[in-house]
Image: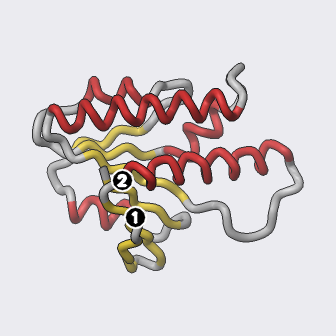
Amino acid sequence: MQLFIGGACAGKRSLVKTRFPSAVWWRLAPGQRLRECAGVMLPSTPLILHGVLEWLSASMDSDAGSDGWRSQWCDDLNELLQSAKAQQTALVIIASDIGRGIVPIERHQRRLRDLNGWFSQDVAERAEHVWYVRHGLVQGLPNK
């Protein structure tokens, strides 16, 4: 798995499109479990998952607390990685970096930043490669 992370309009999509021209792109839907993305995998065809921030935001109202939800997406990530390995599919996740800057007053926005940070950490921990994209420039980051 590879993680491409950076701010809004940093060039993540363009970079991923260039590196994975034959990929299947899948926008995460509100309430969708990550493990369900295995259903759109095609053997030997890269799968790009995007829309993480919107997915997190729309799913924040679920009954699961932060710890329960984080545990669920970690289990799902592990299953998704196993499916990708079995199908020899490169899995790529595009995530937004929103943790820098002023801490918002609104509770909802603070929680979104926490969830996004935890999600990005959990993906980075499992990723073979982590790329930080800023102003169209890409930098490989050590993740182990």
| Relative depth, front residue between 95 and 79 | 79
Question: Is 1 placed left or right of 74 in the picture?
Answer: left
Identify the residue shown where x is 26% and y is 59%: 17
**Place of residue 142 in the rendered image (x, y in percent of width and height, measured from the top left):** 40, 70
Dot 1 alpha-carbon crowd within 10 angstroms: few under 14, some 14 to 19, many 20 or more: many
- Residue extending furthest toward the top: 63
**Place of residue 110 in the rendered image (x, y in percent of width and height, measured from the top left):** 78, 50
Q: Does residue 100 lie above or below 60 as drawn?
A: below
CB of mark 2 within 8 Å of CB of mark 1? no
Q: Quadrant of residue 25?
A: top left
- The amino acid at mark 2 is Ala
Q: Quadrant of residue 80?
A: top left
**Residue where numbered disc 2 is placed:** 127
Q: Does residue 17 lie above or below 22 as drawn?
A: below
Question: Is 122 placed left or right of 90 in the picture?
Answer: right
Identify the residue shown where x is 59% and y is 35%: 70
Can I make out residue 11 in this image?
no
- Residue extending furthest toward the front: 144
Identify the residue shown where x is 45% and y is 29%: 75
Q: Secondary structure at mark 2?
A: loop
Identify the residue shown where x is 20% and y is 56%: 20
Q: Earlier in the sequence, mark 2 or mark 1?
A: 1
Can I make out residue 140 in this image?
yes
Dot 2 alpha-carbon crowd within 10 angstroms: few under 14, some 14 to 19, many 20 or more: some
**Place of residue 104 in the rendered image (x, y in percent of width and height, measured from the top left):** 82, 58
- The amino acid at mark 1 is Lys
| Relative depth, front residue between 57 and 144 | 144
Q: Which mark is residue 12?
A: 1
